[in-house]
Image: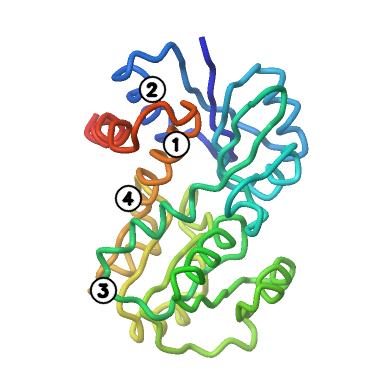
Amino acid sequence: MKIFSIFGDPISHSRSPLMHNSVFKALGICACYSRTHLNNSSQLRDVFLAKKLSGANITVPHKEAAYAQCDEVRGIAKTIKAVNTIVYEKGKLIGYNTDADGFMSAIQSFGPIKNALILGAGGTARALSIALLRGEITPTILNRSPGRLDFFTKEGITAYCWDGFTAKDYDLIINTTSAGLSDEELPIPRPLLLELLSRSKGAVDVIYGKETPFLREIKVSGLPYKDGSDMLLAQGVLASYLFLGGEFALKTIEVPMKHSFNL
């Protein structure tokens, strides 16, 4: 039996086991998928190998550490320098990033987008900013502190700290921080958020499965919005495709995975 898992902190909320196990069952794959709560990012590789995993997904806050601990990184993950999917292949950990394509698929329903403001500067923000750039959408980063902004400036992406940032008009505001996941925090100060929402056309919270304070403010504003469910599904289909070695078509994987959202 092949064993898969998702690494994160927190991790109890993750729908990934239900999603991937639904695919394995529907396709008759002898495999199981579980959660792994990991506090220390530096232990990711050791835990992966100790569990004898065939593959894994990586969520906050370990995506950048996962990139560093892979033997090889492929595709857009090489540019992003953040990994959310690992496949064990011939004794090596091969890293991928399915967040980027998953996000671009999820935002199609918003219609034409010229620019977007991304809240946060972690691995998910990296993936989304590069995906937006490649989709000819101008991203801007807004983070609490300057510590992680070098990546973005080196990629030619405008990046700000809260101090010194002035609200502008954006087609889309995207929360990639963990604010609201296990607390009642907003990703940025409320007065600034309200001003940004008043000047924006839509919003996305990559968190799924709960109404975060960020989502509540969006609903009050009346803006079109999405939580992270569509992105979760799209990236999950791509991850499962990689786990199964490309043996099944994406649509074949999508049907049972989408059905798992109704369970």
Instruction: Please tell me whether mark 3 or mark 4 is closer to you in this view.
Output: 4
Q: Answer whether labels 1 and 3 touch (C-beta < 8 Å).
A: no
Residue sitting at 49 percent across and 63 percent down? 131
* Element under disc 1: loop
Q: Which residue is mark 4?
A: 230
Q: Is residue 7 above or below residue 79?
A: above
Residue 263 in the image: state x and y as whole percent: 24, 29
The three-letter code of the residue at mark 4 reads Asp
Q: Which residue is mark 1?
A: 14
Number of residues whose C-alpha sits closer than 10 Å to that of mark 3, classed few (under 14), some (14–19) or many (20 or more): some
Mark found first going from the N terminus, 1 or 2: 1
Which label belongs to residue 21? 2
Q: Answer whether labels 1 and 2 touch (C-beta < 8 Å).
A: no
Q: Which residue is mark 3?
A: 223
How far apart marks 3 and 4 lie (CA) works out to: 18 Å
Of residues 1 and 212, the one drawn nearer to the viewer in this rendering: 1
Mark found first going from the N terminus, 4 or 2: 2
How far apart marks 1 and 4 lie (CA) works out to: 14 Å
Number of residues whose C-alpha sits closer than 10 Å to that of mark 4, classed few (under 14), some (14–19) or many (20 or more): some
Residue sitting at 30 percent across and 60 percent down? 226
Mark found first going from the N terminus, 1 or 3: 1
Of residues 185 and 32, the one drawn nearer to the viewer in this rendering: 32
